[in-house]
Image (cartoon, rainbow, N blue to C red):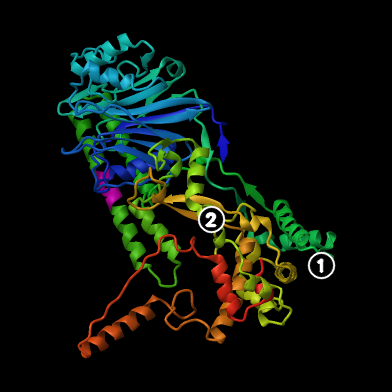
């Protein structure tokens, strides 16, 4: 886990969105705002979200509380994926909707709360309960619909305004940081300026906070941008990556060859030392020729939508300028009309750009185009982001206890994903008959050295997938020249002949991903993605290809097995089932079928039993070892 505290400030934005749905252009403008400003946290009120609306953001995790039983309302918090956060339990009523999270700055916990009072009639008890929900320093922001002379001149005090002021008098450590007469909303019927979007902070946080407003993005409310003087602790969830240059592969290969020659690689007989030399040569050459980029987690921005062209950006700016001109002369009918026309033109421009983007994409669809490219565009158009990170979830143990710490969560997942710790010794004990075949001296084609042709086949069509913890990338292996492919083949044969498996090949970086629609607090709601060494996966291809050839040529696999076989698929089983049903129907017989879905089937493979099967299929020596 990479922890970053280099930033000295934290930016929090609060905004009454007045409806943030895919059906309006406001969401497009909001994502463009996020891409431009990259705030750490966003406090939203009046989201108008319900159970059927599930917006997703690439760079942010959503913590939300929707209004139930009535339309409108709703509050949410967007927390940047680099932040360490936990859900915060806060009081929420019909008069004062609220949702909260806890972020970390160094060793300090800071509560951040988004609130919304729809009718401006929240009571002092409700406001006080919100301010006293925890003992941590806190930041509270939202649309309170409160009116009071403390923050707006020449206004009539209402219930929310009175409740807020009375609470501040009772709890002097909480300070209003919204500047007096800061216009946070402009109404057109009638034309009025008001200050109803308020921000409060504990005294320790309020002293060096600065507050300003941003562009309205189609809402009557302006986003409030607050810069705090503390640095939120960030976690680098993204692994480092190589900045490859396709013009430098020749230089890289030359460097690898030079390093291997200097180490007398081909004279090394010890497989462990041979692997160590080859691996170090790959990594050392990569450091000399390329750059290893350590991603700054705070710089991961929300991508703007694909159709947000320069014309859309210009129209957004023009609409904002027209609105500002009207606000500065709010009684002018002419400027009001100009503002409304510019806003309507902005919406038309965005919708037209969206439609044209879809049409251009559809007209250029080509079966030869990479599937990943098509899906990337589709997700970007629909505004779909990454799954919410497990870092932001309060996990529950089987006993119902809450787990919040990163180390405790890791141990909880380790206990769940590593089923080997729950199995008895029979699941790891090698059968004596298998052990005898491993040591059998008889010749076997399976144990002959790998050939150059086999390696070329294994290196074909390598995907630029994520690398393991050893930092060896598939691009390195795919770009090996003839000399270094021969060096790699020498290493693999040395390992295969000895049955030695490098320790780094037995390690994996495991990433829990939340399954769609599952409870984020349950560990069984996650599936594990394991990032393995790319070298180990190439070696695995070699061994798997040879075993598959052995089993297929000798017809050792049952005919009804279609999975994991070249030229076979589940369609074969479906056709066979269909034929059996038709035959039985013709003969007036019944057909019974049993469908089994084995939970975590791969994890539960009985390895000693699998080895016994392979041994019974005329496999001996190296092909059983390792």
Q: Quadrant of residue 88?
A: top left
Q: Which residue is mark 1?
A: 266
Q: Nearer the viewer, residue 129 or 443?
A: 443
Determine whether, in the image, residue 520 is placed left or right of residue 129: right
What residue do we see at 29% from left, 49% from top?
A: 349
Give SS at disc 2. helix
**Residue at (33%, 45%) from the top-left corner?**
28
Say if 281 sits above or below 442 in the image: above
Characterize the magenta stretch by its predominant secondary structure.
helix
Residue 203: image location, x then y, percent: 42, 15
Q: Quadrant of residue 392?
A: top left
Label ID, residue 420: 2
Q: Is residue 529 left or right of residue 484?
A: left
Identify the mark nearer the N-term, 2 or 1: 1
**x then y, percent, for residue 298:** 51, 38
Residue 206 drawn above or below residue 452: above
Q: Nearer the viewer, residue 116 or 98?
A: 98
Q: Are marks 2 and 1 in contact (CB under 8 Å)?
A: no
Quadrant in the picture for the C terminus: bottom right
Q: Is residue 139 magenta?
A: no
Q: Quadrant of the N terminus?
A: top right
Segment tinted magenta in the rendering = 345-351
Residue 144 is marked as none
Q: Residue at x 55, y 81 (%)?
A: 551
Is disc 1 surrounded by few (<14), some (14 to 19) or many (20+) residues within 10 Å? few
Residue nearest the observer in this picture, 319 or 163: 163
Q: Is residue 298 visible?
A: no
Quick one: label 2, few (<14), some, or many (20+) residues within 10 Å?
Answer: some
Q: Is residue 347 magenta?
A: yes
């Amino acid at each position: 886990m990479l922890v970053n505290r280099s930033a000295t400030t934290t930016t929090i934005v609060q905004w009454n969105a007045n409806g943030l749905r895919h059906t309006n252009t406001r969401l497009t403008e909001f994502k463009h705002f996020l891409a431009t400003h990259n705030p750490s946290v966003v406090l939203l009120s009046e989201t108008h979200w319900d159970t059927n609306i599930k917006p997703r953001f690439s760079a942010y995790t959503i913590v939300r509380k929707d209004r139930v039983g009535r339309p409108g309302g709703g509050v949410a918090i967007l927390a940047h994926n680099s932040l360490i956060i936990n859900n915060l339990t806060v009081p929420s009523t019909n008069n004062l909707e609220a949702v909260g999270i806890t972020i970390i700055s160094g060793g300090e916990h800071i509560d951040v709360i988004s609130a919304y009072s729809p009718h401006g009639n929240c009571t002092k008890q409700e406001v006080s309960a919100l301010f006293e929900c925890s003992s941590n320093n806190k930041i509270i922001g939202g649309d309170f619909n409160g009116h009071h002379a403390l923050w707006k001149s020449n206004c009539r005090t209402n219930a929310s305004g009175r409740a807020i002021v009375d609470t501040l008098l009772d709890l002097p450590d909480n300070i209003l940081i919204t500047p007096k007469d800061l216009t946070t909303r402009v109404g057109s019927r009638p034309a009025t300026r008001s200050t109803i979007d308020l921000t409060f902070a504990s005294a320790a946080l309020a002293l060096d906070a600065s507050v300003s407003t941003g562009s309205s993005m189609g809402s009557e409310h302006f986003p409030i941008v607050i810069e705090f003087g503390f640095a939120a602790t960030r976690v680098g969830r993204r692994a480092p990556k190589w900045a490859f240059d396709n013009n430098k592969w020749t230089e890289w290969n030359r460097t690898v060859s030079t390093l291997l020659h200097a180490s007398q690689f081909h004279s090394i007989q010890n497989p462990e030392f041979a692997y160590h030399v080859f691996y170090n040569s790959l990594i050392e050459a990569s450091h000399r020729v390329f750059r290893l980029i350590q991603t700054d987690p705070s710089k991961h921005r929300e991508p703007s939508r694909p159709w947000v062209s320069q014309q859309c950006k210009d129209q957004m700016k023009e609409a904002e300028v027209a609105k500002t001109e009207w606000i500065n002369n709010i009684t002018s009918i002419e400027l009001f009309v100009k503002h409304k026309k510019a806003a309507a033109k902005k919406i038309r421009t965005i919708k037209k750009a969206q439609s044209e983007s879809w049409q251009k994409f559809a007209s250029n669809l080509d079966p030869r185009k990479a599937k990943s490219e098509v899906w990337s565009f589709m997700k970007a158009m629909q505004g779909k982001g990454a799954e919410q990170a497990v870092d932001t979830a309060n996990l529950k143990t089987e006993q119902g206890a809450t787990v919040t710490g990163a180390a405790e969560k890791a141990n909880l997942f380790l206990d769940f994903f590593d089923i080997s710790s729950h199995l008895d010794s029979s699941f790891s004990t090698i059968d004596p008959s298998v052990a005898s075949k491993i040591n059998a001296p008889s010749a076997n084609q399976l144990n002959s050295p790998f050939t150059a042709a086999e390696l070329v086949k294994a290196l074909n069509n390598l995907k630029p997938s994520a690398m393991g913890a050893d930092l060896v990338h598939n691009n390195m292996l795919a770009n090996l020249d003839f000399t270094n492919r021969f060096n790699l083949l020498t290493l693999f044969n040395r390992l295969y002949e000895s049955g030695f498996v490098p320790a780094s090949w037995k390690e994996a970086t495991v990433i829990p991903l939340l399954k769609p629609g599952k409870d984020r607090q349950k560990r069984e709601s996650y599936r594990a993605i394991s990032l393995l060494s790319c070298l180990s996966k190439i070696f695995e291809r070699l061994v798997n290809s040879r075993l598959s050839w052995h089993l297929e040529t000798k017809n050792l696999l049952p005919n009804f097995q279609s999975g994991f076989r070249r030229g076979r698929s589940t369609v074969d089983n479906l056709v066979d089932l269909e034929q059996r049903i038709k035959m039985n129907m013709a003969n007036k017989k019944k057909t019974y079928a049993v469908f089994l879905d084995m939970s975590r089937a791969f994890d539960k493979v009985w390895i000693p039993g699998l080895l016994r099967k392979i041994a019974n299929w005329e496999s001996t020596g190296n092909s059983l070892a390792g």
